[in-house]
Amino acid sequence: MTKTRQDAWQEEADIQLADIVLRHIREGSTQLNAFEEAGNKMKRTAAACGFRWNAVVRHQFEEQVEEAKEARKEKLKLMGKASRAANLRYLTQSTEEENRSFPLSSLSLDIVIAYLARLQRSEGSNTRVEQLHQLTAKRADELEQRLQAAERENFLLRQEREEFMVMMDRARQLVALGQELPDRTQFQMEHNGNLVRVEQI
């Protein structure tokens, strides 16, 4: 489904955007997730919602943002060690629901660590990551080589330009003094300041 652009932001849309973002902050989710949800609900892009939040709406709700951050801290404190241990057991067990998704707001550091430990134990899980890393490193090397070649070429062009400017200055001086060049080639200066070579007969 493509989202159509709506130019004008109404006050109701600003309030709806603020409610969604504040809820995500309280739940420990990211603002990017909030912008995605707001974009889907308001038929706008996530980027438009993010821009509106950062440019206009956030400044109107600074107190509420601080309150939401405090609420998130309190929620994390209340989770306690028992909740973290339960989450750790849930993620380290190998069940049929292994690929089940759950909200980002329920994630804690222990959950992430347990998930990464299980992921590390699974065979071949990081093969794709390694391939992607190798491709990225190869591409970075290619770009570095191209950059170095471009810098060398730029350096040579600068040297040639400087040599050419020295030759032009010398030719202008010789023409201004009416002297002949050693190879019997003469230059004549036009009204616009360009030098034109005059062949000797």
Image (cartoon, rainbow, N blue to C red):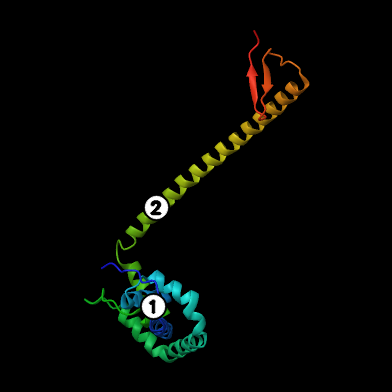
The answer to whether residue 83 is left or right of residue 157 is left
Disc number at residue 48?
none
Q: Nearer the viewer, residue 132 or 52?
A: 52
Q: Give the image location of residue 96, x and y in percent.
A: 21, 76
- Mark 2 vs mark 1: which is more N-terminal? 1
The residue drawn where x is 63% and y is 33% is 161
Distance of mark 2 from mark 1, alpha carbons?
Answer: 33 Å
Q: Residues within 10 Å of mark 2 (few under 14, many from 20)?
A: few
Q: Which residue is mark 1?
A: 34
Q: Give the image location of residue 190, x and y in percent.
A: 66, 25
Element assignment for label 2: helix
Quadrant placement of the N terminus: bottom left
Q: Quadrant of residue 24?
A: bottom left
The disc labelled 1 sits on which kind of residue? Ala
The disc labelled 2 sits on which kind of residue? Gln
The residue drawn where x is 53% and y is 42% is 148
